[in-house]
Amino acid sequence: MFATRSIGIRALSLFWQLIIVTLSFWGWLFIWQNSVFQESAGVQRYILYFEFLIIGVVFGFDRRERAEPGKDWLIANRKSLRQAFFGLFSVFLVVFALKDVGISRSFFFSYLPSLYASLLFSNYWLPLSIAQRAFSGEREERAALVGTLETADRIQPWLERKQLMGMRTVGLVCAEQAHAEASTLPILGTLDQIGDILRTKSITQLIVLNLSLGGERLREITQLCENAAVRLVVLHDLQPYFNHKTIVFEDDGVRFIGLREEPLESPLNRFVKRLLDLAVSIPVVLFILPFANLLVWFIHLFFSPGPLFFRQVRNGMLGRPFTIYKYRTMHVHDDSDGRQASRNDPRIFRGGSWLRRLSIDELPQFLNVLLGDMSVVGPRPHLPQHDEAFVKVTQNYFIRRFIRPGITGWAQVKGYRGEILSEMDIQQRVEADFHYLENWSFGLDVLIILKTAKHCFVPPDKAY
C-alpha cells in the first residue's frame, strides 16, 4: 500500500542520509586536521561527539512530515535546518556537560555548512532517487479510480505525487456513463464493465473514491478484485456525510470515527501542560505581581482612584463560569461590562490605555491559572452574552470549551485580538483556536508564550 511504500522510502532515505553525514563529518575533519589519525585521544573524543551528532540528526528527522504540492524544496530545507540544529545542539550539550576544553568549537562551526548541504541533498534528492529506482519496471502499479469526476479531480494533486512511487493512474470508472471531456482523466467505462476493465487494461490496483456506491456493489467489486489479483483500497472521505473532516482511531480493539484529534485528552499531556502553567505562573505571582500591584495602584491614584482589580464572570472549560481577574483600566461607575473596548474608548483612563497596550492589565490572570480556572495558553474566555452572540456566527464556536481558556493563545499571536468588528474576525479566531486544540504540543505552548512576550515589548496595532 501507499503508506508502506512511503515508510520504506523514508527509512532508506534516513539510512543513506546517515552514511552521507558520516562521510562529510570525517572528510571535513580530515581536511581540517590534515590527518584524522594525528592523535588517538583526539579521535576518540571526536567519535563520541560524532555519535551524538548522529543522534541529533535522527531525532530531528520528522517521520510525520506531510507532502505539500510544489513545496518539496521548502520542506527539505525546513527538515535540514531542524536536523542540523538538533545535531549541533546534541554535540554542544555533551561538550558543556563534560566541560571539554580540548575539542575544537571552530571545527564544528566550520562543519555546519557542510552538514546542512549534506542534509539538504539527502532530504530532497534521495527520496526521489530511491522512489524512482524502487518503483519502476515490474514494480509499477497501474491504478484505476472508481467514483465521481468531482472526487477524482479533488485528489488529482495526490495522484501526481504518487507517480514518484510507481503508481500510474490509467483512468476513471464512473457509476454512470460520463463524457470524457468533462474530466482530466480518461474515462474507462461504467461500474457494470469493471470486470472487463480490470482484465483488458491490466489494472493492478483499484481505488474506490466513494462509499456511497452501497454495500452490495462494494462487495461485488471486492470479489472481482480478489479473483483478478488486484489490490483494492478505498478513499477514507467521510466529509460529505459529516460535513467535517474525520479521523479514525482504535480503542481496545474497537474502531471509531471522530471529528478531530485532541492531544489534551491524554492525562500525560494535561499533566505536562499543567506543569508548564505552574512553572510560568508561580514566579509571576511571587515576583512580578507585587511590583505590578504597586505600579498600577500609583497609576490609579493619579488618573482614576478606585479598586485595583476588575472582576468579571467569564465562561471557562465546558462552559463553567468563573471569575476572571484583571487590573482595572476603565473609570469606576462607567458601563464597562458587556461592551468591548474600542480604539480611543472614553471609558479608559489615561494610564489605563498604557496598561492595556503593554498587556500589564492581564497579569492578575496568573492567579486564575494557579486556581486552575485558566491556563497560560488557550482560547481567550469571553463574556456569556458574547458567547451567545458569537455562536450565531459560527455554529461550532463552543468547541473551544473542550480545553481551559488561556491568558494568551494561537489566535492572539496570529494577530486576531482586540475589538471584533466583523464576522470574519470571529471566524478567524475560532479557526485559530481549533488549530490549537487539534495540534497542541509542549513546543507549541512555548512558542506562543515567547511570541506573546515579544508582543508585550512590541505591541501590535490591535492592542488597545
Image: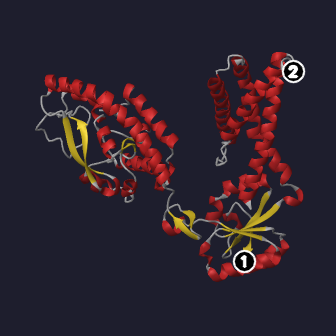
The percent coordinates of residue 33 (x first, y second) are 82, 16
For the residue pair 448 and 297, the one nearer the viewer reads as 297
Q: Identify the residue shown where x is 31% and y is 31%.
A: 286
The percent coordinates of residue 186 (x first, y second) are 74, 65
As drawn, 297 above or below 215: above
Q: Is residue 364 left or right of residue 185?
A: left
As drawn, 430 above or below 305: below
Q: Identify the residue shown where x is 50% and y is 58%.
A: 260
What residue is pinned by disc 2? 37
Query: In the displayed image of the protein, which residue is found farthest to the left?
Result: 333
State which mark lies toward you, 1 or 2: 2
For the residue pair 346 and 249, the one nearer the viewer reads as 249
Q: Amino acid at mark 2?
A: Phe
Q: Identify the residue shown where x is 23% and y is 31%.
A: 344
Disc 1 secondary structure class: helix
The percent coordinates of residue 219 (x first, y second) are 68, 80
What residue is pinned by disc 1? 222
